[in-house]
Amino acid sequence: MVLRGVRVVELAGLAPAPFCGMIFADFGANVVRIDRPNAPDIDRLGRGKRSIILDLKKPQGVGIVKKLCASADVLIEPYRRGVMEKMGLGPNILTKDNPRLIYARLTGYGQDGPFADMAGHDINYLSLTGLLSMLGRKEGPPTPPINLLADFAGGSLICALGISLALLERTTSGMGQIVDANMVEGTAYTGSWVYSSQDISRLWGKSRGCNLLDSGAHFYNTYETKDGRYMAVGAFEPQFYYQMITLLGLDPDLVGQMDDFDSMKKVLEDKFKEKNQKEWTEVFYGKDACVTPVLTIEEAPHHPHNTYRGTFIPSSTNDGGQYEPRPAPYLSRTPGSVQERAAPLQMEERIAESFLTKYTKKGSDMTGKSPHNNKMEDQMVMPPPPPVFEDDFPSTHSCVFPINNTQAHVSSFSSLMK
């Protein structure tokens, strides 16, 4: 895979950092996640990663992280400004030992500024970009679009892009650098088109919920069907709108695209309630009308297009549903693939040294990954990496296996070593 041989150290955090690390694991990087002792297990983005439990409040834990980073290519840290420095793991220290290290800092507000030390979540970061003010229905409050825009689009993906750019630049300079990725700026950057198109009055000239792309227009909206389900309508261009109106059995001359939006919505609302979702899906199947069914999370993996493309694959864990998205984008020669998540390792001193020896060995790839078939239809969940201590500590095999809960079923290494 394209990132095979790249070594990533990820400090455990909430959703943005784990997803960023998972992207690298999906495309072949050797990702080691540092978990905190007795921390609640809320991460569902640990596939393909090796997890170790370290107490970073103790010198030994900090020392192990330093040794890992001394031979790593990338560090992903999700803490607020100054936390890493207080632990003695700031960029000035780690990059001194390893000038090639890409030190990625993924935060809400960035490394400086009035809000740098403040707590926040997706909705807070989104609110500061101005984008949240544009989301919602007419005469209603701003509506948060679950935690996808800031946490994952503006956070995880932008951070992964920054790391990839830094790795590419390092091939010529030989030097690492700090990646300051934060969710406010990342989300704002993701919304570049929205900012640059504000002068187009037909798009954004009215209040929230009254514009062409924010549910204000009847041709870009969702409609309830006879069975209480919904259809998504995106018939923005005139030719698509004409096709939609015709397939609905309406007269295009009587339902003009730019006629009064509210009255036209009522016409479409009444029409869509004449059939159930399945029937409307059949009507619009294969037609250029930009009308599709609103699927549930459970239904999406079984949609004909998604099954043909292999968009979803059997889940590598039993944490959530039975399916999870396949790594994207698809690369023709070096596609990503999914590995199961392995159990975390309690890092006693002796075992930690063995781990470090294997991890820091030049050219080491502890993931157990082999080149994968390039055919798209062959994408599948790969088996978990072999135990890290397979050669050194055969008696600990039962402690390293794929499990549902990363904090569960971990035997005491200290008792095993006695």
Image (cartoon, rainbow, N blue to C red):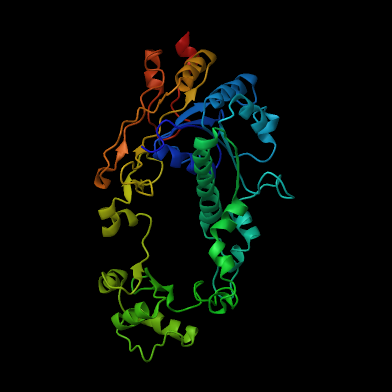
Where residue 145 appears, as percent x and y from the top left, is 52, 60
As drawn, the residue found furthest toward the bottom would be 254
Q: Is residue 115 left or right of residue 397?
A: right
Q: Picture quarter containing residue 178? A: top right
Residue in view at x 56 percent, y 32 percent = 101
Q: Count numbered badges in the picture.
A: 0
Expressed as whole percent of the image width and height from the top left, the position of residue 74 reads 53, 34
Q: Position of residue 272 (x, y in %)?
A: 35, 78
Which residue is at the front of the view, 387 or 25? 25
**Quick one: which residue is furthest to the top in this view?**
418
Q: Position of residue 338 (x, y in %)?
A: 35, 39
Give the answer, above or below, for where 239 lies relative to 155.
below
Name the residue: 43% across, 28% down. Answer: 343
Vertical order, 366 against 393 (above or below): below
Vertical side of 398 occupied by 109: above or below: below
The one nearer the camera, 93 or 416, is 93
Which part of the image, by quadrant, shows the N terminus?
top left
Query: Could you tell me if residue 187 is visible in this image?
Result: yes
Residue 41 visible to an observer of this rendering: no
Q: Residue furthest right?
A: 114
